[in-house]
Image (cartoon, rainbow, N blue to C red):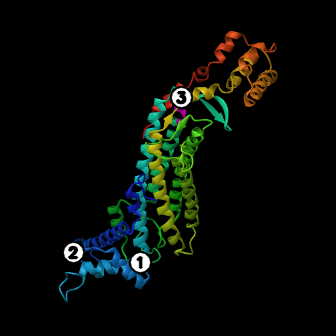
């Protein structure tokens, strides 16, 4: 998954090396909290020794886990060996204070939430960067005329800048959701076997969480409730859907029959092994495909919310796959979108040709209103416009030369709109006299 469009930092966050590093920090912080509390017997000197000598070796942890079949115990055994390595023979071993009064989920869940905040920070940066690109390009293309489409059919004129602007607004909403989801998952819990603090003072939890930038869970049941994680997964899925929406639009606009926009095609790139002429929207197709993975993984997170009683581990195996995959895939998707949207190639001349392709049919709504303004009922006006429009429609789609909508209306004795009004109506910019309102709102948008 990690390639030239994916930052290695995201993959590292979900690596065992990073997880164990976070585990080590949590265990050291817990020892320091116990020493500051002064109740368990650990001294400040011992806590300082643990801080200075704590370490782990992933390969060694793996070897121990092969025997213990318990990842936390394997890690603690390995970490303890480093802490005690230089302790004189016969002296008390400082490692005895590591994991004092804690259970595995105290360590694992707190670390996982911290890792998720790390990952959220990268995705937030991604979202902000793409939003800024869309906002910039919206103003660059605010006057680039193109046809709007509904149901895939030509509708009314718009500007291409509005497409970028719509994407910018959606990314801004994604950014707000991501920020809230990060806050919602930034929790830690060190409360013991079933969350009663039976063997550990709540101060330790508060101390560790404060130093990690987390809030302490107000009531954990050994595990931090997975509704936090489900909400985050849903937000990631929404972000993926946003990127899929943008990618789908670019794919549609790159079709040979449309060709108004095209993802960058660099020198030396090949589009097809069989057809040398091909320039395919492969990056946007990849984004659409990966979106399915992120959206599907959200269902895993929702299924993980319901556990047996205070805790089971049915959630653990699933989320170890789904969370890492979702974040790595989404980060990759963002890197792809940053490159493509920033370098998106536009073809304004083709946009103008497409705008004229239906020989004036896109002006039908303005004609309808103009007929009503002359005193004709809306129903009768609709019949006049539709009758002439369908004749043009048949000519266009049968590749038959013939008069456009403007010419047919002028020849229709039932059309009561004067020629000078038709001149005004059949100007695409007549549809866009209020478009400045849209861009004025965009001026107030910031990432």
Q: Position of residue 169 (x, y in %)?
A: 51, 39
Tag 1 residue: 71
Q: Position of residue 213 (x, y in %)?
A: 35, 59
x 52%, y 40%: residue: 167
The relative height of residue 386 versus residue 189 in the rendered view (above or below) is above
User: What range is drawn magenta here?
Assistant: 159-163
Tag 2 residue: 49
Residue lying furthest bottom in this view?
A: 90
**Rendered image quadrant of residue 186:** bottom left
x 37%, y 81%: residue: 63
Separation (CA) of disc 2 from disc 3:
68 Å
Q: Secondary structure at mark 2?
A: helix
Tag 3 residue: 348
x 23%, y 74%: residue: 53
In magenta segment, residue 161: yes
Residue 344, which numbered label? none
Q: Position of residue 212 (x, y in %)?
A: 34, 62
Q: How many C-alpha atoms fall within 10 Å of the one at disc 2: few (<14), some, or many (≥20)?
A: some
Q: In the drawing, does residue 278 fall left or right of residue 178?
A: right
């Amino acid at each position: 998954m990690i390639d030239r469009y994916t930052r290695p930092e995201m993959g590292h966050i979900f690596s065992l090396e990073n997880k164990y590093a976070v585990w080590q920090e949590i265990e050291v912080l817990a020892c320091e909290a116990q020493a500051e509390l002064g109740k368990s017997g650990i001294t400040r000197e011992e806590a300082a020794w643990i801080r200075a000598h704590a370490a782990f070796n992933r390969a060694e942890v793996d070897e121990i886990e092969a025997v213990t079949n318990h990842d936390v115990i394997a890690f603690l055994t390995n970490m303890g060996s480093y802490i005690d390595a230089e302790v004189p023979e016969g002296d008390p071993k400082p490692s005895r204070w590591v994991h004092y009064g804690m259970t595995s989920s105290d360590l694992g869940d707190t670390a996982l939430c911290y890792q998720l905040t790390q990952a959220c920070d990268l995705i937030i940066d991604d979202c902000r960067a793409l939003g800024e690109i869309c906002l910039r390009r919206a103003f660059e293309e605010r006057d680039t005329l193109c046809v709007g489409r509904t149901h895939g059919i030509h509708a009314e004129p718009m500007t291409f800048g509005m497409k970028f602007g719509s994407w910018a607004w959606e990314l801004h909403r994604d950014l707000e959701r991501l920020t809230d989801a990060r806050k919602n998952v930034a929790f830690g819990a060190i409360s013991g076997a079933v969350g009663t603090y039976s063997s550990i003072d709540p101060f330790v939890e508060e101390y560790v969480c404060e130093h990690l930038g987390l809030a302490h869970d107000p009531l954990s049941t050994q595990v931090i409730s997975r509704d936090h994680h489900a909400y985050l997964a849903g937000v990631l899925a929404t972000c993926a859907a946003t990127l899929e929406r943008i990618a789908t639009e670019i794919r549609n606009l790159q079709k040979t029959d449309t060709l108004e926009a095209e993802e960058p095609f660099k020198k030396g790139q090949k589009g097809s092994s069989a057809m040398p002429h091909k320039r395919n929207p492969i990056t946007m197709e990849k984004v659409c495909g990966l979106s399915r993975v992120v959206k599907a993984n959200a269902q895993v997170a929702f299924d993980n919310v319901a556990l047996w009683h205070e805790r089971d581990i049915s959630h653990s195996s699933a989320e170890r796959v789904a969370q890492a995959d979702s974040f790595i895939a989404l980060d990759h998707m963002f890197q792809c979108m940053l490159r493509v949207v920033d370098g998106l190639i536009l073809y304004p001349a083709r946009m103008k040709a497409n705008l004229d392709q239906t020989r004036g049919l896109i002006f039908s709504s303005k004609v309808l209103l103009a007929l009503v303004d002359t005193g004709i009922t809306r129903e009768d006006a609709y019949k006049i416009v539709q009758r002439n429009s369908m004749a043009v429609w048949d000519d266009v789609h049968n590749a038959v030369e013939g008069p456009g909508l403007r010419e047919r209306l002028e020849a229709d004795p039932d059309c009561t709109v004067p020629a000078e009004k038709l001149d005004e109506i059949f100007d695409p910019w007549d549809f866009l006299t209020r478009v400045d309102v849209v861009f004025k709102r965009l001026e107030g948008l910031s990432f």
